[in-house]
Image (cartoon, rainbow, N blue to C red):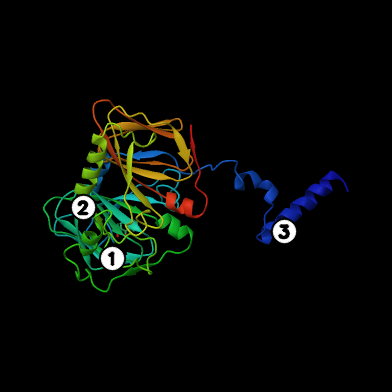
Amino acid sequence: MTSTENTTTDERAYASMAELSAAPLWRQYGELMPAEPPSRARAHLWPYARLRPVALHFSRALSMAEAERRVLMMVNPGLTDPPATVPTLFAGIQIVMPGETARAHRHAANAFRFIIEGDGAVTTVNGEQLAMRPGDLLLTPGWHWHDHAHQGHSPMMWLDGLDYPLVNSLNAGFFELYDAPVQPVANPDEASSRQFRHGRLNPAWRAPSTDHPGVSPVGSYPWEETERALATIAEAASVAGSAAEGILLEYSNPWTGGPVLPTIACRIARLRAGFAGVPRQHTASTIYHVVSGSGSTTVGEQRLDWNDHDTFCVPGWARYAHQVASDGDATLFSYTDEPVLRALGLYREQWL
Ligand code: 1HN
């Protein structure tokens, strides 16, 4: 056979493969087996000062009847279809105005809210009513009914974190509307949070839920407690904290001591004035939200300069380091898919 005959028979064989929904691995091997993970996600920052007026515009232009939730999605420029902030996780800014409610629903995806501004709103989660105050972390774990109602006076805005990109990629996404706009309140007094809020003392008459393994029974982690913990530790000058993340605390599930949701770990860090983090990389992807302060995070060749209430992401296996200016401390809330990677034996980290 001549080489032209070879080419044409090869071409025919490639065409047959395509018709059979088969493909030659030898043409894609390097892409499928990368030496290191080449995240499609990019490091990116969403400035709150610019998102806020857009959210306020839609609080007037779009009624709650027109939107299941009035949320500005923070879409990673490398992850637009489907929209996600990092490959596994989502971040959004939700706005609810005085007098409005966001109707009750539930989804398989795990979610939480981290409150940015406003006062007087509540979220009801499986019958338990939880107050929303700036800095509070509220959990709405997968398949828990939740609705939001605002009885206060100023716009209520919060950060929504969800794992729907992961859940949908696993083809495990379910959604259901409640049969009324709001669910009845069975626990107006934050009963679960009160029982489990005492660190080393857990209610001995209760047992972890078998319906929702790996889910914290605590509905709300109020800012007052978080701030007290950060301040108490930061006061001890001898406590250096993590070389990469400063005084980094993880919100914990009181049953396990582990992450608050099976797929998402939520954390809060105080970075002292002048902090210069040691660079590192890990396979977990992280979304950060600036509670207060200013600084910058170097991710690969990029520098993200952040201020109060900005949100930014560090994709998995990106090299990153935080820096804080010398004129004040910074406080960073963050969430990560680290529990997923650890559960699957895929967590790796490297200090640089
Ligand atoms: C959702 O259901 C909520 O329940 C918030 O408040 C943000 C973002 C994407 C998809 C569903 C909520 C969401 C969401």
Disc 1 vs disc 3: which is toward the camera?
A: 1
Disc 3 beta carbon < 8 A from ligand 1? no
| Residue 59 tag number | 2
**Left or right placement of residue 250 versus residue 285 in this view:** left
Q: Secondary structure at mark 2?
A: helix
Q: Residue tagged by mark 3?
A: 16
Between the residue at mark 1 and the residue at mark 2, the CA separation in whole angstroms equals 45 Å
Q: Nearer the viewer, residue 249 or 140?
A: 249
Q: Secondary structure at mark 3?
A: helix
Q: Nearer the viewer, residue 321 or 251?
A: 251
Kindly identify the amino acid type of the residue bearing the numbered disc 1.
Ala
Q: Residue tagged by mark 1?
A: 204
Kindly identify the amino acid type of the residue bearing the numbered disc 2.
Ser
Ligand number 1: quarter of image: bottom left
The image position of residue 316, as x and y in percent, is 46, 43
Kindly identify the amino acid type of the residue bearing the numbered disc 3.
Ser
Residue 315 makes an appearance in the image? yes
Specify the farthest residue to the right.
1
The image position of residue 36, as x and y in percent, is 56, 41
